[in-house]
Image (tube, grey):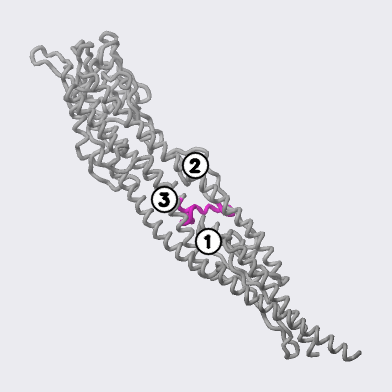
């Protein structure tokens, strides 16, 4: 009987060591495989009737620290979000320029200012007028491009959200399939370590996209939940859904034109705060719209301040037709002083002058009627209104408006009648949403085509004759335009910038400085999170990774044990032959 037990012990040792050698060889083969964890062949002794009867393989287990893996996945999600921020902020730096860069919007404003100063020195110079138009056109193109680039980045962020959701859904499906295989194998007493490795890889990919919580059930299946406690996978998978936008404008916002992220019919967009998806949501709905609001604030202030002064003057020769660049739907609280309507000859001399006495509170139609009455049809000149748009037709004569002070009401600053009606604006463009004027700002078409229409001087009166005229060398208006850019203006709070008082170029610098600061913060946080991730990954790999030297040393032990077990079989066989021979 004892000889049989010896043989059984030896055979069980051979089988067990053979299985252990197979596990070791698999470890060595996958030493550099991403996501592979070291497997350990667990052995236990066989006891029959209180007597040792060999050894058997109790199971193949993974050598992992589950708590460390859980923490690593959380850090991975944070790092993924910071990597997204780094990419987008870097692109914004490349597109918009850093503070002090010659390609920045503040530098373009400075060049526009310099061109105005040049024209103020030589108001009759053609090259100075052309240089001014070149600087102005470059400025509006940069505003338009920045607005367009921001919406392009928002669209990209939204589409990347959709791709990230596809990744999450695909990995959830994989985990669901692995759950079924693991639970079945576990019920049959079969090893599940390799399947668990594959499931961990899928979990890692999900955790990079958004923050999750999860736990392992008694049957070996994993249940996965969102940060808000909503089930992504618990018995049955619950896929996320999001319809990406095909185009993006400042008016497309979430919630609204931009679709949310839905789970089982519920919008969970606001619950996703971390991971790549969380960072993309923050960029699409926060950071980038903030910059749009800031640029809108800058472009609107530039338009209003330049137009206010530009409307006080006229070009030479003056425009023969003035039309509101945008409708005036409001009613003036009051008009003080006397408005002068002057029709000018091409050389700037007076052809006709009339006054419009303060008519009290009037809207665009009322002012048009008052101006038309003052013109009295001279030479066919007229004024009309339609839908808040006023048109003054000089019938071939240049048209200039001077004098009078309008109180628009509603706390808006006082201005002149031409500015109130937007008749001689330099910057134009219609922004239907009222949120992105930077995207539409432009130079008035007739001024862009004929720089002579730029207001350089104002209508003056000859002290001797009493006639009105525009002087060739008058630079009074263009000088004020140039000086505007060194004045401290009030900018309301917008985007991420608080209310402030600064120059136009100074506010542009604040926009870029805030973007640069966000980029620097993202870089710093990314470096810190990367260091933490690398440290935790090193610890996790040290625990669960394969050390080839250690495996080879273990292989020698298993080889010796296998050889010893084989020797036992040989000895038992020889003893059986001796016994058999004795019986013969």
Sequence-wise, which precedes: disc 3 or disc 1?
3
Q: Nearer the viewer, residue 68 or 418?
A: 68
Residue 115: horizontal and vertical position, in percent? 23, 28
Query: Above or below — where is 486 with respect to 348?
Result: below
Is disc 3 surrounded by few (<14), some (14 to 19) or many (20+) residues within 10 Å? many
Q: Quadrant of residue 153?
A: top left
Does the magenta segment cover residue 323?
no
Q: Nearer the viewer, residue 10 or 155?
A: 10
Query: Above or below — where is 575 with respect to 513?
Result: below
Q: Which residue is mark 1?
A: 212
Sequence-wise, which precedes: disc 2 or disc 1?
1
405 lies left or right of 24: left
Q: Nearer the viewer, residue 458 or 32?
A: 32
Q: Residue furthest top?
A: 379
Q: Which residue is mark 3?
A: 86
Bounds of the magenta span?
262-279
Q: Secondary structure at mark 3?
A: helix
Sequence-wise, which precedes: disc 2 or disc 3?
3
Q: Which residue is mark 2?
A: 257
The tally of labels here is 3
Q: Is residue 437 visible?
A: no
165 lies left or right of 134: right
């Amino acid at each position: 009987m004892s000889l049989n037990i010896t043989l059984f012990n030896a055979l069980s040792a051979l089988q067990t060591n053979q299985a252990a050698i197979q596990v070791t060889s698999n470890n060595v083969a996958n030493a550099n495989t991403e996501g592979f964890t070291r497997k350990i062949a667990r052995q236990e002794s066989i006891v029959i009737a209180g007597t040792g009867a060999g050894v058997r393989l109790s199971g193949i287990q993974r050598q992992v620290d589950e708590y460390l893996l859980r923490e690593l996945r959380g850090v991975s999600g944070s790092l993924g979000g910071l990597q997204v921020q780094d990419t987008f902020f870097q692109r914004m730096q490349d597109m918009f320029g850093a503070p002090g860069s010659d390609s920045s919007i503040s530098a373009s404003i400075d060049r526009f200012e310099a061109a105005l100063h040049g024209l103020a020195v030589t108001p009759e110079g053609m090259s100075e007028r052309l240089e001014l138009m070149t600087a102005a056109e470059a400025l509006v193109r940069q505003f338009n491009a920045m607005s367009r680039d921001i919406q392009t980045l928002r669209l990209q962020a939204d589409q990347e959200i959709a791709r990230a959701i596809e990744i999450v859904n695909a990995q959830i499906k994989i985990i669901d399939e692995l759950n079924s295989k693991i639970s079945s194998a576990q019920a049959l007493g079969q090893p599940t370590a390799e399947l668990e490795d594959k499931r961990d890889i899928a979990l890692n990919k999900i955790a990079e996209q958004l923050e999750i919580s999860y736990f392992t059930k008694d049957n070996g299946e994993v249940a996965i939940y969102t940060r808000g406690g909503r089930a992504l996978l618990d018995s049955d998978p619950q896929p996320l859904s999001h319809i990406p936008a095909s185009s993006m404008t400042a008016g497309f916002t979430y919630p609204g034109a931009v679709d949310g992220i839905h789970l089982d019919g519920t919008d969970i967009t606001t619950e996703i705060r971390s991971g790549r998806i969380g960072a993309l949501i923050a960029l699409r709905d926060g950071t980038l719209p903030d910059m749009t609001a800031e640029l809108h604030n800058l472009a609107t202030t530039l338009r209003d301040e330049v137009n206010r002064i530009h409307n006080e003057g006229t070009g030479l020769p003056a425009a023969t037709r003035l039309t509101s660049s945008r409708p005036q739907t409001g009613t003036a609280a009051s008009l003080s002083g006397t408005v002068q309507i002057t029709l000018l000859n091409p050389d700037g001399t007076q052809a006709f002058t009339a006054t419009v006495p303060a008519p009290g509170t009037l809207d665009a139609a009322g002012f048009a009627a008052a101006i038309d009455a003052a013109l009295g049809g001279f030479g066919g000149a007229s004024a009309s209104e339609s839908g808040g748009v006023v048109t003054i037709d000089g019938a071939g004569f240049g048209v200039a408006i001077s004098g009078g002070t309008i109180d628009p009401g509603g706390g808006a600053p006082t201005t002149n009648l031409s500015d109130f009606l937007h008749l001689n604006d330099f910057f134009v463009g219609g922004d239907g949403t009222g949120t992105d004027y930077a995207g539409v700002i432009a130079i008035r078409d007739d001024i862009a085509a004929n720089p002579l229409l730029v207001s350089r001087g104002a209508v003056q009166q000859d002290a001797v004759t009493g006639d009105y005229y525009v002087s060739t060398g008058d630079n009074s208006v263009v000088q004020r335009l140039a000086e505007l850019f060194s004045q401290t203006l009030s900018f309301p709070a917008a985007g991420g910038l608080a209310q402030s008082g600064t120059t136009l170029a100074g506010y542009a610098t604040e926009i870029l400085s805030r973007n640069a600061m966000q980029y620097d913060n993202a870089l710093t946080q990314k470096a810190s999170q990367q260091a933490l991730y690398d440290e935790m990954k090193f610890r996790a790999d040290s625990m669960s990774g394969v050390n080839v030297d250690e495996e080879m040393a273990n292989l020698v032990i298993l080889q010796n044990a296998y050889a010893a077990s084989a020797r036992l079989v040989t000895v038992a066989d020889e003893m059986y032959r001796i016994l058999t021979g004795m019986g013969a």
